[in-house]
Amino acid sequence: MLSSPLKSQKIYLSDFTLMVFDECHHCNESHPYNVVMNHVRGSKICPQIVGLTASTGSGKSRGGKINPEDTLNHIIALCARLMAVTISSVKIKQNVEDLLSRISQPVDGKYLVYKVTVLIYIF
């Protein structure tokens, strides 16, 4: 049984055949995603898990520097917490182009901000 904010309601893993976690890179320690996954890992019932993220992160770096080995270990630990069997990404050129046509590209820009302008918006 999963925890519910409404104590009178009970949610069971058997109620689910699929769980989708958006921003799954947050699945660590006491994050609610990991709490749910602790129930899944401890159960014989296993719904299909789909984790979505744009950035897996790199874990905690030593001395403020990103270390490739630490990054790989971070990704492996994330996959283990989500019981990942497969990692998929968009690689086929046609699919990449299709994906890029559907998302907004970030725009870098510099804007001059004057103290008077800021004060107008604050007050």
Image (cartoon, helix red, strand yellow):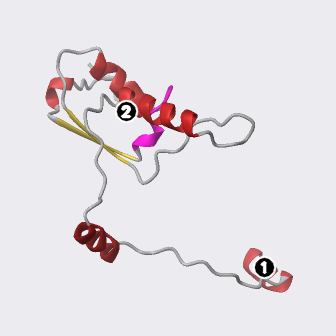
Quarter-of-image position of residue 81: top left
Instruction: Check if mark 1's residue and mark 2's residue have beta carbons within 8 Å.
Output: no
Residue 33 is covered by the magenta coloring: no
Q: Nearer the viewer, mark 1 or mark 2?
A: 2
Quarter-of-image position of residue 24: top left
Q: Which residue is mark 1?
A: 118
Quarter-of-image position of residue 83: top left
Q: Which residue is mark 2?
A: 79
Q: Give the amino acid type for the residue marked by disc 1 in the picture.
A: Val
Question: Distance from label 1 to label 2 (Cα)?
Answer: 44 Å
Q: Earlier in the sequence, mark 1 or mark 2?
A: 2
Across and down, in percent, residue 53 comes to 39, 49
Q: Residue at x 64, y 43 (%)?
A: 66
> Is 91 drawn above or below residue 72 in the view shown?
below
Residue 60 vs residue 99: left or right? right
Q: Residue at x 65, y 37 (%)?
A: 61
Q: Which residues are magenta?
A: 24-30
Across and down, in percent, residue 84 comes to 29, 32
Residue 55 vs residue 113: left or right? left
Q: Give the amino acid type for the residue marked by disc 2 in the picture.
A: Cys
Position of the C terminus by quadrant: bottom right
Under circle 1, the secondary element is helix
> Is 42 drawn above or below residue 26 in the view shown?
above
Q: Which label belongs to residue 75?
A: none
